[in-house]
Image (spheres, grey):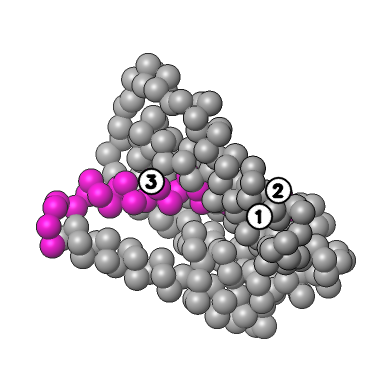
Amino acid sequence: MVVLDTTIVIIALPSAQSALGFGTESRQWIVTAYSLAFGSLLLIGGRLSDIIGRRRTLLVGLLGFAAASAVGGAAVGFGMLVTARAAQGVFAAILAPAALSTLNVSFSEGRERSRAFGIYAAIASGGAVVGLLLGGALTEWLSWRWCLYVNLLFALPAAAAVLMTLPAREVGRGQARQLDWPGVLAVSGGLFCLVYGLSNAQTVSWTAPLTIGMFVA
């Protein structure tokens, strides 16, 4: 689902543009908003599962992702859609590290864990391609809005499975103080500049002042 949403809206962009009435130059932000939030907040997402526990982090990520998808699907304007996509990226950054951490502790070392990570990697690597195909099919047969609504069909059952299978984990209040906020913010800011620079290079130019400025920062 996390990788799927990097590409699922690409085919739907012309339909969304027609429905919401935004310009062609604004299309990139529907994709970029997700990538920026996801790429820049991964470090915080990974640390969050250590602070509040994997179970809670997975639930926050899944339910938040579902809510953001519902808001995006119901968007009545460009700003609402971009904000929802950015929120999807935030919750994806929370969800992805927690999912990997859960796999790591749920399977014993050796062949069993290797198989689990192999399956995860295969699903993740195919997610971008599946996203394009699924996005095209949903846009053609239903509506571009279903490229966002479809996430509810994945996220809500997954959240129910988390509630039923993962034990609750209590974490002491003092553990939250272990988060190095200055370091986290510095790294997250650097990742934001890197992702934004790469995105701007693809849509504008590698030699554009903004692209160079982002890479330098």
Q: Looking at numbered disc 2 in the image, what kind of residue is underneath it? A: Gly
Label 3 environment density (alpha carbons within 10 Å; few <14, some 14–19, many ≥20) = many
Q: Nearer the viewer, mark 1 or mark 2?
A: 2
Residue 58 seen by the camera: yes
- Tell me the tag on residue 213: 2
Cα distance in 3D space between marks 1 and 3 = 27 Å
First along the sequence among labels 1 and 2: 1
Kind of residue indicated by mark 3: Ala
| Badge 3 vs badge 2, beta-carbon distance below 8 Å | no
In front of the other: 149 or 197: 197
The crowd level at tag 2 (other Cα within 10 Å; few <14, some 14-19, many 20+) is: few
Q: Which residue is mark 1?
A: 197
Q: Mark 1 or mark 3, which has the lower sequence index?
A: 3
| In the image, residue 131 above or below residue 53 | below
Disc 2 is placed on an element classified as helix
Q: Which SS class for mark 1?
A: helix
The quadrant in which residue 54 appears is: top left
Evaluate whether residue 69 shows in this view.
no
Q: Quadrant of the C terminus?
A: top right
- x then y, percent, for residue 139: 67, 77
Horizontal side of 10 relative to 105 (left or right) equals right
**Residues at circles 1 and 2 in contact by the CB criterion of under 8 Å:** yes
- Chain part drawn in magenta: 82-111
- The part of the image, by quadrant, that contains residue 147 is bottom right
Q: CA distance from mark 3 to mark 2?
A: 33 Å
Depth order, front residue of 151/214: 214
* Among numbered discs 3 and 2, the one appearing first in the sequence: 3
